[in-house]
């Protein structure tokens, strides 16, 4: 079996959230990595070689930080489950409301710009080689004026990326291993996982399902999905996502003011993930920099992924205000710039051409239409679960619906939904222990599929 | 308040070497309570200067400010100049258009890269050495993958680099915390093993005097020296790695510039799959410096000391810290590897190689010691007894040509200048002419003869 298959159908426990990390390899490479087999739908042949050859091993130790990770990254795990399900039911009409992957075509005005840039690369006048690592000037300027016009964030504070996920890791590289961090619980798994990889955390503690040294800020219906900051220990870095993935909660101005004050009092840095800002329906801040004083305590990261369907095109940005300083007075932006110049080489010029088109009046309008489409999907899903008597959260300010299944194990619910309705969702515990008992349903999908999914949910839960 | 200049590096007096520039602008704490309490990453403090290439850009800008009418010729940063062949950009344009259709729209791609592209890379470059598509990870460029590999390896491994070498190996090592302190006296980081290269050892390190390190970065054809290691040399390297249980990170970004029968992949050497990772790029191959596409090969056989496959951890990094190369760039990559695409690209590579030949001839005819330029788009010129930043400055001042001072690549580059062969033919010829004027008839104080 090819390694790709191995990586996509690795041994998975169906009833626990702790996944087995090692995979097995084809024995024709004369090596066997023994992996305990749990009960599975997939039969994997792991033959041991006839001649017990001892495989050559280097003397390089495995990075202990990576060894701390409990399982694969969440979304490839969900993808594995989906693939396994399709093997079991090859004719099933699987509907994916799991991984938050956009489905609707990119508006013409945007793709035309990218096509034009591509063509230009074949001409003498239009060819460009290395771009500025921080991003093309026009894009940075357009981002500044579109999103931060009256907030005092300038072009040079903005760094264009190939997506927020990549910048999260680059920020971790900037911070290094000797900082402590806090995350919302539940939260987008890249914050925790990148922190583990960077060496900021201790071991995973199975009893509480948390990594030692990370401060998990519980966000529940009881506290309106905003942490009780009076119970939160000081950490150097605070990751905060609003509108939130996975809960869909959007922090109010009052809440963010408290958060900024908390950061100020503690001398902490907020890394504010605003990837879903344009999904906001209510009058909540879209940027942390709407809060006075935020420039001295916050970095903001954002993405074109969910606005323009750029999940595959790859484009985002990070704002590091020049006012943000380390404890010795050194500007964080300078170090971020150094990382960007050394560990990155700029977002693709074609993607950036698309980004610029996104920010034209026509492009912004077109993006709003697509966002509106997904918001309508979200509404349909919310209504469905409401009508079935579930406690439903989110969906108002984000393309995610957070459904409560009190007392139930979320991977079990995930499996049950998958098995009985052929719908892929995401189990809440994948986002942290605070997600246990919840399922995240994402609202990206063709309208027919979303409607069909809702029909099936109604059938299952009526 | 600290102000960042538009090119995001500090403005400074032209004649200061980079180290002094940084020191003179160290920020004084404001003392007004506006700092956070977050300590700066000590590893970043250890970096001596700005990354080399933005520094070169800065010098170019300063020079242009001083001589606004100068016709500056950039042979510094290795930036490709020739348009991408049409069939390749057409495929990218078509892919972009398709993203506006229901059938053609694609969202997240596999983080490891498009399956078809991975297969094409395996078949094009590794057909005879049995590297599988599942061992190929598509990236947004080798520079990015170097840092991802460092994240994979962590702070507790030791590294060796060629000296001189592409600065990202050392800088990423410092950033991740492997390198120890910089020692002013030697110009080296304490924990890094610098394997000196020069004409005296045929640009291949003397492995008999090289201590063991966990990781060995090795670039061939080499940036900046242009030397392509021979089969025998690479056999020695693989043997050395095997004996020491080390991992070679083989940078083959310039493989398609090889003119002789030097190996193009480390995996041509038997036994390499158990000791090596190979990184590569479409940048210099296809003019994709701005498009952003590359790949890394991690063989399944490569194991950590406990037997854990390296590929598994690299996959985890790729899934967590990355989200795949742009799908449009990948469509372009696939077109590059079609027979017509590859042929068109070969023509561009030959164009740059002819540039290199012209530059080599120029320097040789001036009686200067010149290396490289045969298997790589870099020409490495020796100015014995000189300081490379001074040579750089002299050349820039007198001929308006940007080069790269060898010491930017490590202490082993101290007396050398790197000139790259990317550029329009006319500019290369013009540059050659200007260099001839400067160096002939002993006009330059740089020529000690």
Image (cartoon, rainbow, N blue to C red):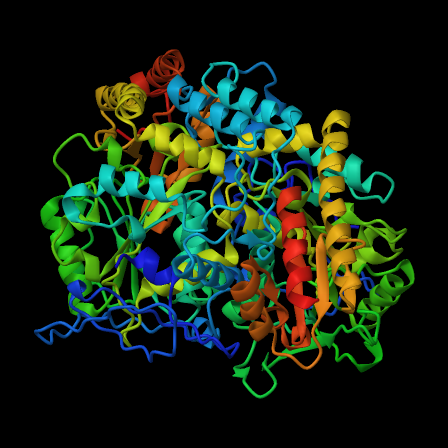
For residue A370, say whether it is visible. Answer: yes
Residue A10 pos. (x, y %)? 38, 67
Q: Quadrant for residue A405, please give it.
A: bottom right
For residue A327, say whether it is visible. Answer: no
Q: Of residues A33 and A342, which is closer to you in this image? A: A33
> Residue at the spot x=71%, y=45% of the render?
A374
Q: Is residue B54 left or right of B223 when viewed as pictured?
A: right
Say which quadrant the C terminus of chain A sits in.
Answer: bottom right
> Residue at the spot x=19%, y=67% of the render?
A27
The mark total stands at 0
Q: Of residues A394 and B16, which is closer to you in this image? A: A394
Q: Is residue A122 above or below residue A352?
A: above
Say which quadrant the N terminus of chain A sits in.
Answer: bottom left
Q: Of residues A414 and B374, which is closer to you in this image? A: A414
Residue B166 pos. (x, y %)? 37, 46
Q: Is residue B72 left or right of A280 when viewed as pictured?
A: left
Q: Is residue A174 left or right of B133 when viewed as pictured?
A: right
Residue A283 pos. (x, y %)? 90, 51
Q: Is residue B79 above or below residue A79?
A: above
Q: Is residue B20 above or below residue A219?
A: above
Q: Quadrant for residue B203, please give it.
A: top left
Q: Of residues A320 and A110, which is closer to you in this image? A: A110
> Residue at the spot x=85%, y=45% of the render?
A151
Residue B438 pos. (x, y %)? 37, 19
């Amino acid at each position: 079996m090819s390694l790709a298959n191995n990586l996509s159908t690795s041994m998975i426990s169906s009833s626990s959230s702790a996944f087995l990390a090692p995979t097995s390899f084809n024995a024709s490479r004369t090596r066997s990595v023994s992996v305990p087999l749990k009960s599975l739908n997939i039969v994997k042949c792991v033959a041991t070689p006839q001649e017990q050859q001892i495989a050559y091993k280097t003397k390089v130790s495995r990075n202990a930080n990576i060894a701390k990770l409990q399982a694969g990254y969440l979304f490839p795990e969900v993808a594995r489950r989906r693939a396994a399900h399709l093997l079991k039911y090859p004719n099933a009409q699987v509907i994916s409301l799991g991984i938050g992957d956009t489905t609707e075509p990119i508006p013409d005005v945007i793709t035309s710009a990218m096509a034009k840039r591509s063509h230009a690369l074949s001409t003498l006048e239009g060819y460009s080689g290395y771009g500025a690592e921080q991003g093309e000037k026009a894009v940075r300027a357009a981002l500044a004026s579109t999103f931060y016009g009256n907030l005092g964030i300038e072009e040079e504070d903005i760094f264009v990326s190939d997506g927020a996920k990549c910048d999260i890791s680059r920020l971790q590289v900037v911070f290094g291993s000797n900082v402590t961090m806090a995350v919302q619980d539940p939260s987008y798994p890249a914050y925790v996982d990148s922190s583990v990889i960077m060496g900021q955390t201790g071991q995973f503690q199975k009893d509480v399902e948390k990594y030692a040294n990370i401060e998990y800020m519980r966000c529940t219906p009881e506290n309106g999905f905003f942490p009780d900051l009076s119970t939160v220990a000081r950490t150097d870095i605070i990751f905060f996502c609003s509108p939130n993935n996975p809960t869909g909660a959007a922090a109010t101005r009052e809440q963010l003011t408290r958060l900024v004050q908390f950061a100020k009092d503690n001398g902490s840095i907020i890394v504010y993930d605003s990837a879903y800002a344009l999904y906001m329906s209510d009058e909540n801040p879209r940027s942390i920099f709407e809060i006075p004083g935020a420039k001295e305590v916050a970095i903001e990261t954002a993405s074109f992924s969910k606005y323009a369907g750029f999940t595959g095109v790859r484009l985002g940005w990070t704002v590091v205000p020049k006012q943000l300083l380390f404890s010795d007075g050194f500007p964080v932006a300078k170090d971020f710039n150094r990382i960007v110049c050394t560990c990155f080489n700029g977002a693709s010029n074609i993607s950036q051409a698309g980004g610029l088109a996104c920010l034209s009046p026509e492009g912004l309008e077109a993006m709003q239409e697509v966002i509106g489409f997904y918001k309508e999907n979200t509404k349909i899903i919310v209504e469905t679960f409401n009508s079935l008597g579930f406690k439903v959260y989110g969906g108002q300010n984000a393309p995610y619906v957070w459904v409560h299944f009190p007392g139930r194990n979320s991977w079990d619910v995930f499996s049950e939904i998958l098995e009985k309705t052929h719908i892929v969702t995401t189990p809440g515990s994948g986002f942290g222990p605070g997600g246990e008992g919840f399922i995240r349903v994402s609202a990206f999908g063709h309208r027919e599929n979303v409607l069909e999914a809702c029909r099936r949910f109604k059938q299952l839960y009526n | 308040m600290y102000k960042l200049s538009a090119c995001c590096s500090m403005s400074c007096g032209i004649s200061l070497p980079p180290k002094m520039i940084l020191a003179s602008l160290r920020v004084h704490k404001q003392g007004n309570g506006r700092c956070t309490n977050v300590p700066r990453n000590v590893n970043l403090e250890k970096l001596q200067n700005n990354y080399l290439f933005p520094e070169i850009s800065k010098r170019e800008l300063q020079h242009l400010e001083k001589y606004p009418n100068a016709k500056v010729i950039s042979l510094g940063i290795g930036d490709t100049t020739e348009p991408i062949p049409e069939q390749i950009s057409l495929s990218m344009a078509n892919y972009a258009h398709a993203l506006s259709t229901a059938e053609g729209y694609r969202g997240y791609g596999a983080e490891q890269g498009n399956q078809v592209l991975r297969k094409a890379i395996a078949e094009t470059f590794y057909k005879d050495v049995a590297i599988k598509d599942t061992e190929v990870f598509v990236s947004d460029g080798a520079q990015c993958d170097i840092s991802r590999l460092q994240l994979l390896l962590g702070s507790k491994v030791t590294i060796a680099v060629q000296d001189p070498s592409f600065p990202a190996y050392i800088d990423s090592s410092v950033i991740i915390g492997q390198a120890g302190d910089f020692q002013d006296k030697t110009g080296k980081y304490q924990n890094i093993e610098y394997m000196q290269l020069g004409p005296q050892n045929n640009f291949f390190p003397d492995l008999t005097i090289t201590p063991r390190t966990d990781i060995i970065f090795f670039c061939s054809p080499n940036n900046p020296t242009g030397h392509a290691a021979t089969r025998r040399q690479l056999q020695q390297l693989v043997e050395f790695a095997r004996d020491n249980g080390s991992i070679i990170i083989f940078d083959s970004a310039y493989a398609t510039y090889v003119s002789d029968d030097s190996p193009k992949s480390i995996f041509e050497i038997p036994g390499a799959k158990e000791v090596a990772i190979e990184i590569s790029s479409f940048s210099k191959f296809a003019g994709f410096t701005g498009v952003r596409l590359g790949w890394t090969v991690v063989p399944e056989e490569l194991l950590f000391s406990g037997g854990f496959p390296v590929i598994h951890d690299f996959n985890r990094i790729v899934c967590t810290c990355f989200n795949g190369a742009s799908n449009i760039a990948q469509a372009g990559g696939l077109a590059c590897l079609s027979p017509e695409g590859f042929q068109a690209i070969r023509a561009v590579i030959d164009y740059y190689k002819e540039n290199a030949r012209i530059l080599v001839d120029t320097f040789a005819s001036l009686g200067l010691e010149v290396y490289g330029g045969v298997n790589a788009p870099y020409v490495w010129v020796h100015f014995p007894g000189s300081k490379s930043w001074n040579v750089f400055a002299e050349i820039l001042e007198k001929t308006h040509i940007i080069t790269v001072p060898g010491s930017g690549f490590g202490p082993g580059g101290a007396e050398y200048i790197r000139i790259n062969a990317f550029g329009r033919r006319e500019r290369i010829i013009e540059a050659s002419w200007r260099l001839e004027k400067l160096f002939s008839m002993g006009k330059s104080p740089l020529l000690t003869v």
